[in-house]
C-alpha cells in the first residue's frame, strides 16, 4: 500500500483502515483536486464524499489521541494523590 491511501492496484483503501497521517495527506489531495476544478458533477460529488469520510477519520484519530492524553494525565494525578491510600 502506498502512503497516499492507495493499494498496489490503485483501488482506494477503505477510509477506516487509514492512519491519521495517511487520511490527512489524502484529504489534502482531495481538497487540492476539488479546488482545481474541471471534474464532472459525479466525480466531484464522489471526491467530496471521500473527503468528508477522510475528515471524519482524522477527527476519530485526534479524539482517540486526546482521550489517551487525558487518561494519562488523570492516571498521573491519581498516582500523585496521597489521599487515595
Image: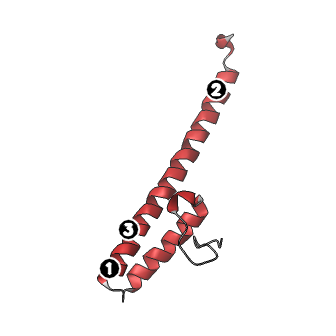
**Residue 2: quadrant of the picture:** bottom right
Q: Where does residue 22 sit, x and y in percent of width and height?
A: 59, 66
Q: Residue at x 64, y 22 (%)?
A: 78
Looking at the image, which is closer to me, 2 or 80? 2
Q: Residue at x 47, y 63 (%)?
A: 54
- The residue that disc 2 covers is 77
Marks 3 and 2: which is nearer the front? 3
Q: CA distance from mark 2 to mark 1?
A: 53 Å
- The residue that disc 3 covers is 49
Of the image marks 2 and 1, the number of the one nearer the N terminus: 1
Of the image marks 3 and 2, the number of the one nearer the N terminus: 3
Q: Name above or below for residue 78 compared with residue 65.
A: above
For the N terminus, which image quadrant? bottom right
Are there few (<14), some (14-19), or many (20+) residues within 10 Å of tag 1? few
Q: Secondary structure at mark 3?
A: helix
The reply to whether callout 1 and callout 3 are in contact (CB within 8 Å) is: no
Marks 2 and 1: which is nearer the front? 1
- The residue that disc 1 covers is 42
Q: Name above or below for residue 72 compared with residue 10.
A: above
Q: Secondary structure at mark 1?
A: helix
Q: CA distance from mark 3 to mark 2?
A: 42 Å
Q: As drawn, which residue projects farthest toward the bottom?
A: 38
For the C terminus, which image quadrant? top right
**Residue 37: quadrant of the picture:** bottom left
Amino acid at each position: 500500500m502506498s502512503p497516499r491511501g492507495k493499494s498496489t492496484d490503485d483501488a482506494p483503501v477503505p477510509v477506516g483502515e487509514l492512519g491519521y497521517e495517511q487520511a490527512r495527506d489524502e484529504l489534502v489531495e482531495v481538497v487540492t483536486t476539488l479546488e482545481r476544478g474541471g471534474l464532472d458533477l459525479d466525480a466531484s460529488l464522489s471526491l467530496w464524499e471521500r473527503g468528508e469520510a477522510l475528515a471524519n477519520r482524522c477527527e476519530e484519530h485526534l479524539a482517540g489521541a486526546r482521550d489517551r492524553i487525558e487518561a494519562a494525565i488523570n492516571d498521573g494525578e491519581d498516582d500523585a494523590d496521597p489521599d487515595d491510600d
